[in-house]
Amino acid sequence: MIKPSVLPRRIPMAFALLLLATAPPHRTPAQDKTSATSTKSDEAIRRALVYLKEAQKPDGGWDAGFGRATSATSLAVMAFLAAGHVPGEPGPYRETIERGIRYVIAGQKPNGLLVTNTSHGPMYCHGISTLMLAEVVGMTGDAALAEQARSALARAVDLILKAQDAPGKGRDKRHAGGWRYQPTSSDSDLSVSGWQVMALRAARSAGCAVPAEPIDRAVGYIKRCSHKNGGFGYQPGGEPNNPRTGTGILSLEICGDHNSAEAVAGAEYLLKHPPRWASQYFFYEVYYCPQALFQVGDRYFDAYYPKLVAILLEHQEKDGSWLSGDGNDRSGGRVYCTATAALALAVEYRYLPIYQR
C-alpha cells in the first residue's frame, strides 16, 4: 500500500494559484475576439457556483440522479476549485468546499473505495473522487484536512492499482490495462478507465508514488479503443462518439503521450462532429472534449470550444443550473450537469493542475 507520507503538500501550487488569481488567463488571438463571450462565461460560472452551493445537502454531499454520491460531490468540489476557490483559504465558498471534501473522505470504505452509493458503477465514483482528492492535496491551507486527504488518497490509489490487476483480467488481452464498474471486474471499458487514468496521473503529480508501468499499460488499453477511422470506442472495436473520443484523447495527453496518432485522429473526428445540445451523453462530452482539445492544441480547441460555450450559455437555466436534454445525461442529475458545465467554462482559468498544458 502506498504510504500517505509520500504525498507532500504542493506548496508551489498555492503560489501558482496566487499568480493566476492576479493575472488574466492566456488567450489565443481567436479567443481575444470573443471577450464578450468570455464575460458571459464568467457570469455563467458565478451563477452555477451559487446554484451548487444552495444544492449542497446538510451532510456536505450532493445528489446525483441515483441519490447522494461521491461522484457528484467531487465534481461539484472541482467546479469550485476550477474557478479559483481554494479550501482552507478565506472566501465565500470555503465551508461549502471543505464540507464536500470531508463528505467524500468520510464515505471511504475499508478497502479504500470512495463511494457512498453503489447503485451505479462504483469505480466511476471512485475514480472521480480520487481525482478530486489529488487536486485538493496540494491546495488546501487546512493542515488537518490536508492530512485526511493525503491518507484517503493513498488508499484510493492503492485500490485503483489493485483493480487494474483483478483476477481474470488477463484472460482476454483486449481488456488488459483497463478498468470497469467494479474493483473486481475482469473486463474493461474506456469510460471507467478514463477516470482511473485521470486519478492516477493527478495523484502522481500530487507526489503520490504511482509507478510508470500501470500508467503505460493503461495507455495501451486506451489506444486499443481507438477507431481506425478516428475517434474512440467504448471498448476495443467499438464505434466512436464525441464523449468517448474526448475521454481517449485526454487520457493519452495527460499521460504524456502528446499528439499521438490516435489523439490527433480523435481531434480531427471532433472537428467533423461539433457539439450538439441533447446529443447522447452531452455533458460527458462537455467535461472531456474541451480539456482534451485544449491539450492537443489551439487549432482544435479554437475550432471546437466557442461552439460548445455558445450552447452552454444558451441552455443555462434561470437558477444557474443545467439539465441535459438527453435522457442518459438527465439520469445523472442537475448537479452533475451543472458541475461539468462549470468545469468546461473554466478551462481557460487553468487553476486545476491536471488541466494545465
Image (cartoon, helix red, strand yellow):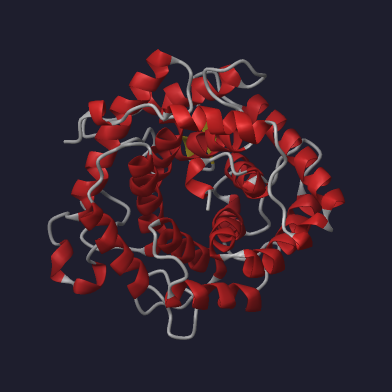
Residue 342 at x, y percent in the picture: 65, 43
Residue at figure coordinates x 66%, y 53% from the top left: 324
**Residue sitting nearer the eye, 295 or 274:** 295
Residue 281 at x, y percent in the picture: 57, 60
Residue 183 at x, y percent in the picture: 24, 48
Q: What quarter of the picture does the N terminus occupy?
A: top left
Q: Is residue 186 above or below residue 98?
A: below
Residue at figure coordinates x 17%, y 62% from the top left: 169
> Is any atom of residue 60 visible in this view?
no
> Is any atom of residue 307 visible in this view?
yes
**Residue sitting nearer the eye, 41 or 53:** 41
- Determine the residue located farthest toward the bottom in the rendered image: 229
Quarter occupied by residue 185: bottom left
Residue at figure coordinates x 27%, y 30% from the top left: 109
Quarter occupied by residue 224: bottom left
Query: How many numbered circles are shown?
Result: 0
Q: Left of 67 or right of it: where is 237?
A: left
**Residue sitting nearer the eye, 287 or 324:** 287
Q: Left of 155 or right of it: where is 145?
A: right
Q: Left of 278 or right of it: where is 15?
A: left
Q: Is residue 224 above or below residue 38?
A: below
- Determine the residue located farthest toward the right in the rendered image: 36
Residue 146 at x, y percent in the picture: 39, 21
Q: In this view, does 219 lie above or below 58?
A: below
Residue at figure coordinates x 41%, y 75% from the top left: 226
